[in-house]
Image (cartoon, rainbow, N blue to C red):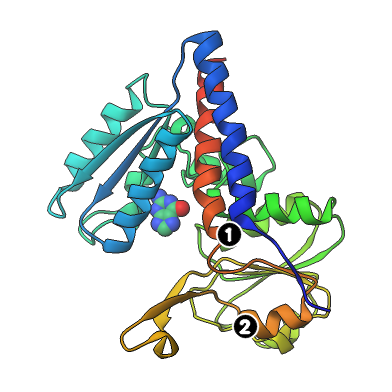
Amino acid sequence: MAATVIDGKAFAANVREKVAGHVSRLKADHGITPGLAVVLVGEDPASEVYVRNKGKQTVEVGMASFEHKLDASTTQEELLALIDRLNNDPSVHGILCQLPVPDHIDGDTIINAIDPAKDVDGFHISNVGLLGTGQKSMVPCTPLGCLMMLRDHHGSLSGMDAVVIGRSNIVGKPMAQLLLGDSCTVTIAHSRTKDLPGTVRRADIVVAAVGRPEMVPGDWIKPGATVIDVGINRIPAPEKGEGKMKLVGDCDYASCAEVAGAITPVPGGVGPMTIACLLANTVTACCRANG
Ligand code: GUN
C-alpha cells in the first residue's frame, strides 16, 4: 500500500497561523511585538535564500524582523559586538546567526555569546544541556518540526524504535534527544555504522539527515515505517531539460514511498516546518522574557 504523505507545507501553514494569533494577542493585550534578529555573514547563496524567507515569514505573522547582513570580512570581534547589542536590545526576543560562518570566525564562540533566552536556534551550550537533561529549553527548529509531525501522525511515540541517520549538532543529535524524551528506543547511525541497511530496517521511525542525495533506498525501510526526510539536495535533472536542477531528499522517495507507512516529501516536508518552528520559538522566547 502506498505511504501516507505527511504534508509539511500544510502543517507549517497551520503552525504559522497559530503563531500569528499569539502575536496579535501579545500586541493587543500587552503592547508587545515579538522581534527576531537574523545575522548573516558573507554571501553564501543558499544562506541568503534562507534568510530572505525567514525575514518574509517573520513579517507575515506580524513580528518585527531585524536583518543584519555583514560583509564576509567582518571580524569575530565585530560580530561579537553586534551579538552583545542584540542581547541587550529589549525589542529583540530571538537571535539567529546563520551557519556556517566564514572560516576566520569560530561558530561555537558566536553561538555561545548569544543570550540563551534569545537563542531561538537552541544551539547555545546551555540549551543543549537543558534539552539533554529533559529540562525546559529552546529546541532546535528542524528536529522540533520533525517531532511535531511525528506526534501528529502517531499520537504517542512511546516504545517505538527510531533510527536517526546523521549526527550533526543541528539535526541528528537534538533529534535523538527529542525522540528519547518521547520514550523511543533511539539509535544514531552515521558514516561509520557497521550495518546501516540492517540498522535502518529495524526502525519504526527513520529520520534521515545526512545531506546525501537519495542515499536511503526503499529496501532499507521496514514495511509500514515512518520516514522523515530532512535532506534538501540540489541535483541535476536532465529529464527536465539541459542544465535543469531539482531538489531531492536523503531518501529515494519513489522506492521508500512504496514500503513506508508514511513519508515526508522533498520539497514540502520538513523544510517548511523549520522556519515555522523558528517563529514559534521566537514567540516562546518573547513570552518567557515578559513573564
Ligand atoms: N544553517 C543551516 N541550518 C541552520 C539553522 O537551522 N540555523 C542556523 N542558524 N543556521 C543554519
Q: Quadrant of ligand 1?
A: bottom left
Image quadrant in which you'd find residue 261: bottom right
**Which residue is located at x 85 percent, y 51 percent?**
156
Residue sitting nearer the eye, 220 or 177: 220
Viewed as shown, does residue 133 lie left or right of 267? Answer: right
Residue 144 at least partly seen:
no
Q: Position of residue 28 (x, y in %)?
A: 53, 11
Task: Report the mark closest to the observer, 1 or 2.
Answer: 1
Residue sitting nearer the eye, 35 or 168: 35
**Which residue is located at x 70 percent, y 42 percent?**
134
Viewed as shown, does residue 204 lie left or right of 168? Answer: right
Residue found at the very far left of the displayed protein: 73
Residue sitting nearer the eye, 234 or 211: 234
Q: Position of residue 223 (x, y in %)?
A: 83, 80
Residue 10 at least partly seen:
yes
**Which amino acid type is shown beneath numbered disc 2?**
Val
Q: Is mark 1 within 8 Å of ligand 1?
A: no
Q: Which mark is residue 216?
A: 2
Label 2 element class: loop
Q: On the rendered image, what quadrant is the N terminus found in?
A: bottom right
Count neighbours of disc 1 (C-alpha within 10 A) and say few if under 14, some if 14 to 19, many if 20 or more: many
Q: Position of residue 239 (x, y in %)?
A: 44, 89
**Which amino acid type is shown beneath numbered disc 1?**
Val
User: Against 161, is 275 above or below?
Assistant: above
Q: Which mark is residue 270?
A: 1
